[in-house]
Image (spheres, rainbow, N blue to C red):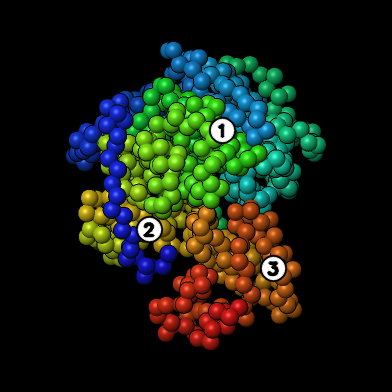
Amino acid sequence: MSEQNLTSVLKEERVFAPPPPFSLQAGIGSMEQYQALCDEAKQDPEAFWARQAGELLDWIQPWDTVLDWEAPFAKWFEGGKLNLSANCLDRHLANWRRNKAALIWEGEPGDSRTLTYQQLHYEVCRFTNVLKKLGVVKGDRVAIYMPMIPELAIAMLACARMGAVHNIVFGGFSAESLRDRIDDAQAKMVVTADGGWRRGQIVPLKDMVDQAIDGLNCVQQVVMVKRTGQQVAFHPGRDHWWHDIIDCVDANAVPEPLDSEHPLFILYTSGTTGKPKGVVHSTAGYLLGATYSSKLVFDLKDTDTYWCTADIGWITGHSYVVYGLLSNGATTLMYEGAPNYPEADRFWKIIDKHRVSIFYTAPTAIRAFIKWGEKWPLRHDLSSLRLLGTVGEPINPEAWIWYHSVIGKNRCPIVDTWWQTETGAMMIAPLPGATPLKPGTATLPLPGIFPEVVDREGKPVGANEGGYLVITHPWPSMLRTVYGDPERYVQNYWTRYPGLYFTGDGARRDADGYFWIMGRVDDVLNVSGHRLGTMEVESALVSHEAVAEAAVVGKPDEIRGESVVAFVTLESSYTASEELKDTLRQHVVKEIGAIARPEDLIFTDALPKTRSGKIMRRLLRDIAAGKQATGDTSTLEDASILDKLRDA
Ligand code: PRX
């Protein structure tokens, strides 16, 4: 979105009050209760978070200081010691939850497994001992590149148990992307599988790992789960089958007492530069954010069967498939495959079969469901649902209404949750028993979170005025740094408005104080709810010998939100052809992954630039969207380029 578009035009007047039966049973059942929490937090944020940390988490040793804030570097609960896996597992073994389902898993081919808290604990302890046996020590990085199978959750909890730092890479990323992430984190081990199932096809994960780590010295061991059973290369001494090595260890693994600020994981995400950033999260603060928000926003009950459709390779899966749910003692469902395999009703079938009560998905998925048609959900009994959620991008009001009526039968509140990889946990979201909903807004901040909409100078703007979304106070689950690059952390998030965290999003606040997110204001795209830096795709394109220069912009897409459009100038020895277009598209898929594949690729003799050489993306965005390029073109170096591009 260009900075000039910050005047929001969306006018949505419909308001949906929480259904009284929902409010009656909810943890927070009224706006008065919500307001009381907000007031408590506002009066003394540190005391508020200390109370939450004491009530929600189990500590091995209490903290000395709640917050040490040397802006922009925060330390929360210093002096305290705890173990995240003990909070997610061990503490539930002492009561009736021991035999409660922690994880219900369904594979794409239809196989399924259920692990109780006791069983999950057993597996996690054993895998902790595998990590130790293979030489992983506290603080080492372990890369995880896996399908959505229980071993993925087991591996991450085992890392947390011994203090190894996990670095999960989404299984849709290419070998090149995986290599960059393993290399940047200097991972000592990779945990993977032979393959995973996606729309009936095998995703060859182990082959990708072999390519990715070829010649990388840091990786000493690879552990792989046998999932799909196809032939894979096996490097003796380096590679181990999960099922073999796990039989060589026992299940005694005492949870390591870890400092509150011990790094829990690194997760790479796109920014405005060509190289993804390794967002670093801490142990105590992150876990507190994930636990607190899950409890409040999902209004969790012990009787719930909760399902978040995100892949664990994204932050949503970290916080809301695994950590926030298990720490609350909930039952979390995990599904391996595609929503339309074998048919377009797979999700509804799963909800029906497992009697799912809370369903959390992305607007892009909802738009696909709408396209596939109502007949698919109507075939199934969805009466077990009591709460719906969305995340990843603004939800268009029409999709919201469809979700509310066709899936929720006008009975289930929808929690539209705004947050980011960097925030670790939800920041702006309704509390379903309290907050009146308006389709298209994530509504109000969680108690203890202080967002604001500011102008270019950092001053708060008035109601309904567009501006930049910032967070004015540190919060426990905030990222701590960019791995190996604290400068970049400061530069990216804290320089634009000193003392304020800059989210990169545009927003407006309406007269009721509701936040309406208007999308990114930087060079970051949101494709199917996933972040993609335009620079990242441009770097991938120019790494091909045929490409002289490339500019990438987003264009509105009915299902995905945005799609990738690339403008490419060629080296003089190459001529434009459909074949070359395909080659370049494939090249991007190889460099980054299928998510970055340019939908449109346009060859051009030159790119529109300012006299100082800056590419004028605003104009390219208009051209990509088929609009007349509007606004100021006076700084354009060569105005004739625009006409040529329009005709291209
Ligand atoms: O632009 C916002 C959008 O997704 C960005 C964060 O992307 P990522 O770190 O990949 O995390 C996605 C899952 C938390 C934000 O800066 N975004 C996320 N949720 C919403 C949203 N935009 C509007 N409404 C949301 N509910």
SS at mark 2? strand
**Label 2 packing within 10 angstroms: few (<14), some (14-19), many (20+):** many
Q: Residue shown at 32%/65% (left/top)?
A: 7
Q: Which callout, 1 or 3, points at the residue further toward the start of the chain?
A: 1
> Where is residue 362 shown, x and y percent of the image?
48, 45
* Residue identifier under label 2: 518
Q: Which callout, 2 or 1, points at the residue further toward the start of the chain?
A: 1
In the image, the residue with mark 1 has its CB under 8 Å from the nearest atom of ligand 1: no
Give the residue type at disc 3: Lys
Is residue 4 visible from the viewing direction of this image? yes
> Where is residue 280 shown, x and y percent of the image?
47, 44
452 sits left or right of 620 in the view: left
Image quarter in which the N terminus is found: bottom left
Give the residue type at disc 2: Met
**Label 3 packing within 10 angstroms: few (<14), some (14-19), many (20+):** some
> Where is residue 176 shown, x and y percent of the image?
67, 52
Closer to us: 586 or 21: 21
Q: Residue shown at 56%/21% (left/top)?
A: 115
247 sits left or right of 297 in the view: right
Image quarter in which the C terminus is found: bottom right
Q: Residue shown at 30%/26% (left/top)?
A: 25
> Where is residue 385 shown, x and y percent of the image?
43, 31
* Residue identifier under label 1: 349
Closer to us: 320 or 407: 407
Is residue 499 visible from the viewing direction of this image? no
* Residue identifier under label 3: 581
